Structure formats: C-alpha cells, structure tokens
C-alpha cells in the first residue's frame, strides 16, 4: 500500500511522535522512509542585524543548514534505533509547508506523517500551522500525529 513515507521533522516532541508512528507503519509495509528537515532562508538584512559575532564569519543560512542537518541526522539515527530500515534523511531550504509538499511530489511519496505542532513561530499561530497547510496542499494522504 505505502512504498514511500515522508516524515518532516523539526526536533519537536510532536515530530518525534510522528517519526515513531512512521517506523511502526514501516513494520507493516515494505516501504522506504524519507526524513525531511526544512529551514527558512534569512535575508542579508536579518544577518547584518544579528548581535552574535563569531570568530569565523558564517551566514545565517549556513548556521540554519547546519542545525537542520543535525536534526535530520538525529531523527534518522532514532528511526534506525527503533528498528527502521531503508531510511534516508534530507535537508531543504524554503517555506516549510510548500517545501514539504514539493518534496513529496518530487519523490513520489505515498504518505506524509507529521506532527500536529512543531517549533513554529508567530506566523504559524496567525496563518495556520504547517501541518494544516500541508494537509490542504498535499496530493497524497497526510497523517497528522
């Protein structure tokens, strides 16, 4: 039934619950798990206004990409520890909901499993959560945990 399951993760407790659910689903279906962490681009203005100055100059995108990579790799490690097989981790940059949906189409995903609330910001409260946006934009089934 399911051959490819996408689990967007942000390190939140809800995304960890979604990851555990996807691993349980994999036990019932011979499928591949795609773990995806999405980070948002920061403009040069936001970077220049940062009050933190490191010894080695890095851009905010480099820092965010590094954090997202750590989150994705940690989720992959957790999935493997829970007994998952065929797990791949990815990191993408962009608006979270649209990037998740675009990735699911590119990889021909059969199911998206995601947490009901993650590490959203004020925009999430005002415009709706990422999970709500994904359920309305996705062309495949979406399971919200």
Image (cartoon, helix red, strand yellow):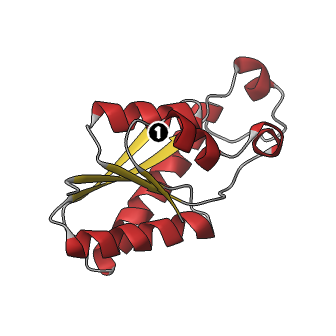
Residue 107 relative to residue 129: left or right:
left
- Residue at image position (71%, 19%) is 44
**Residue displayed at 46% across by 37% down:** 138
Q: Could you say where residue 93 lies in the image, as x and y percent from the top left?
A: 51, 32
Q: What element carries label 1?
A: helix
Instruction: Quadrant for residue 87, please give it.
Output: bottom left
Residue sitting at the far bottom: 82
The answer to whether residue 57 of the structure is visible from this angle is no
Establish if 29 lies above or below 44: below
Residue that appears at 68% across and 55% down: 119
Above or below for 128 versus 59: below
Classify mark 1: residues with Cα within 10 Å, few (<14), some (14-19) or many (20+): many
Q: In this view, does 136 lie to the left or right of 60?
A: left
Residue sitting at x 78%, y 26% = 46
Q: Where is residue 106 in the image (x, y as percent from the top left)?
A: 30, 31
Circle 1 residue = 100
Q: Residue furthest top?
A: 44
Quadrant of image for the N terminus: bottom left
Total numbered circles? 1
């Amino acid at each position: 039934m399911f051959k490819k399951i996408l689990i967007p993760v942000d390190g939140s407790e809800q995304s960890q619950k979604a990851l555990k659910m996807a691993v349980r689903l994999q036990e019932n279906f011979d499928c591949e798990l795609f773990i995806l962490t999405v980070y948002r681009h920061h403009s040069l203005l936001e970077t220049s206004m940062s009050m933190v100055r490191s010894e080695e100059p890095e851009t905010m995108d480099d820092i965010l990409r590094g954090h997202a990579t750590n989150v994705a790799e940690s989720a992959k490690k957790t999935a493997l520890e829970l007994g998952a097989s065929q797990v791949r981790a990815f990191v993408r940059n962009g608006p979270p909901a649209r990037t998740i949906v675009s990735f699911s189409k590119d990889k021909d995903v059969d199911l998206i499993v995601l947490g009901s609330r993650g590490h959203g910001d004020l925009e999430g409260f005002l415009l709706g959560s990422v999970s709500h946006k994904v359920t309305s934009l996705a062309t495949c089934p979406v399971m919200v945990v």
